[in-house]
Image: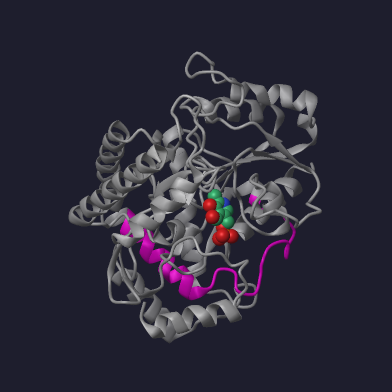
């Protein structure tokens, strides 16, 4: 390690609390496309995208140009003080692009958590009901309400209570670890039908404003519900006038080969939240929903000083253009097929990979100590991340047990980089298996 790097690591330790965690050993100088340049000038292939933010690639020239151009015009006005085009243009675009053949409206915010907070506000205001149902395994953010909605206790919620009231939690459509001990498809997708029982045992349907769900749970381990799940769930919600909020903050903006992951399930939710890859690295989030819900709030019910920042909006317009017009969705679909083939082959080769799941290029492998009992291999997952990084690949973990490795590479990754990345992952898995075998013979 060079001395300047160790100096910065020391400064970081003394000036920034350890509560701001570090998911990888990286410290970077530059990033371009799907490559990071390490402090030492070493090239690292990025399968993390700063947690799913860089779908159009680091420093995408079109995004950089839009940012520069807007920064020269004006960088802030506050949309509630003075209107500006980029905010309106993003809203118009998102209203057109989100699934659903009905009038929609959009509100812009800064972070994913803020988008979820505001989506809940809309559902409560429009229905006049208090309760929100979230799923086991979900993650929706770190503010009081969104951390309450989120499922995993450590580290994001631990000792941060008391939590917000009127949040209920339903079992997860997790086919690898079915909470009902059933098997798909024989289960008849009981996890969706169970909502009717939930209304009897936990909270009345007439008191429920919304159900919130990620199409594919991001932090929860890329849990991918069965094909019938959302159609069934939505049919029940419609019966009771309950709002369906779909959180696309990690799964949206082309991550699964479609602009919105929920398109894979063929439904149109009442409200969709987006953030992360929406503005190519700048902080911007959106709540897009049925016009009659979104427009039910009184003037001033939304807003925020920085919400819908004009530079972030210009970046988002560039991102949407790249996704729509430059064929990035089609590329993502092809990328998904290639990535899935590589991960399936790794599962054949390495006993430690218990499951491969996801859609398009939003894929994950779950590591287990034995395939029968599915004992989570959390320490081994940490070790694998280190082994990958030493070899020039950044990967991120997720999952309730921290034993899942996910693929969030920029969708513009080249075939050569993708191949190199998976070869590193394979070599790292081999090194991990060798170490585990050596340890078991001791
Ligand atoms: C699905 C989902 N919702 C909400 C959030 C919170 O977003 P932010 O960190 O921008 O507040 C995240 C962040 O990982 C997420 O993955």
Residue 163 position in % (x across, y down): 78, 52
Image-quarter location of ligand 1? bottom right
Outermost residue to the left: 416
Front one among 259 and 377: 377
Residue sitting at 73 percent across and 26 percent down? 198
Residue 115 position in % (x across, y down): 61, 57
Residue 82 versus residue 60 in the image, above or below: below
Q: Quadrant of the C terminus?
A: top left
Left or right: 27 in relation to 422: right
Residue 248 visible? The answer is yes
Left or right: 369 in relation to 306: left
Stretch of the chain drawn in magenta: 294-323
Quarter location, residue 155: bottom right
Residue 105 visible? The answer is no
Front one among 306 and 95: 306
Residue sitting at 56 percent across and 26 percent down? 178
Left or right: 144 in relation to 364: right
Q: Is residue 394 magenta?
A: no
Q: Is residue 321 magenta?
A: yes
Residue 226 versus residue 390 in the image, above or below: above
Residue 18 position in % (x across, y down): 61, 69
Residue 296 position in % (x across, y down): 71, 51
The scheme the figure's colours follow is one colour
């Amino acid at each position: 390690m060079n001395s300047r790097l160790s100096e910065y690591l020391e400064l970081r330790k003394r000036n920034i609390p350890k509560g701001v965690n570090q998911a990888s050993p990286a410290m970077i100088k530059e990033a371009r496309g799907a490559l990071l340049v390490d402090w030492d000038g070493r090239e690292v292939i990025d399968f993390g995208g700063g947690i799913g933010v860089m779908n159009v690639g680091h420093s995408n020239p079109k995004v950089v140009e839009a940012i520069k151009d807007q920064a020269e015009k004006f960088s802030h006005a506050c949309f509630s003080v003075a209107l500006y085009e980029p905010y309106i243009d993003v809203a118009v675009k998102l209203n057109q692009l989100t699934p659903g053949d009905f009038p929609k409206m959009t509100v812009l915010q800064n972070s994913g958590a803020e988008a979820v907070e505001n989506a809940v506000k809309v559902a409560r205001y429009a229905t006049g009901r208090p309760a929100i149902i979230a799923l086991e395994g979900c993650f929706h953010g770190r503010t009081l309400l969104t951390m309450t909605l989120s499922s995993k206790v450590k580290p994001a919620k631990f000792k941060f209570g008391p939590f917000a009231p009127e949040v209920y939690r339903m079992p997860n459509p997790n086919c690898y670890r079915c909470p009902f001990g059933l098997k798909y498809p024989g289960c008849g997708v009981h996890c969706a039908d169970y909502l009717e029982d939930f209304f009897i045992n936990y909270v009345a349907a007439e008191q429920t404003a919304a159900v919130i769900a990620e199409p594919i749970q991001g932090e929860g381990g890329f849990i991918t519900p069965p094909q019938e799940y959302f159609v069934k769930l939505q049919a029940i919600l419609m019966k009771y006038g309950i709002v369906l909020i779909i959180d696309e903050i990690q799964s949206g903006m082309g991550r699964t080969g479609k602009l919105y992951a929920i398109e894979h399930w063929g439904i149109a939710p009442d409200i969709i939240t987006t953030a992360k890859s929406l503005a190519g690295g700048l902080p911007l989030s959106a709540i897009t929903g049925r016009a009659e819900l979104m427009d039910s709030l009184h003037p001033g019910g939304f807003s925020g000083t920085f919400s819908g920042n004009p530079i972030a909006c210009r970046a988002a317009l560039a991102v949407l253009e790249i996704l729509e017009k430059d064929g990035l969705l089609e590329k993502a679909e092809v990328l998904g097929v290639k990535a899935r083939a590589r991960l399936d082959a790794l599962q054949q080769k390495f006993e430690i990979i218990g499951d491969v799941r996801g859609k398009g290029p939003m894929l994950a492998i779950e590591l287990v100590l034995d395939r029968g009992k599915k004992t989570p291999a959390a320490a081994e997952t940490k070790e694998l991340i280190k082994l990958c990084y030493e070899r020039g690949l950044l990967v991120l973990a997720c999952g309730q047990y921290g034993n899942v490795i996910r693929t969030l590479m920029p969708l513009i990754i080249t075939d050569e980089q993708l191949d190199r990345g998976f070869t590193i992952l394979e070599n790292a898995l081999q090194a991990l298996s060798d170490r585990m075998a050596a340890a078991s013979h001791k």
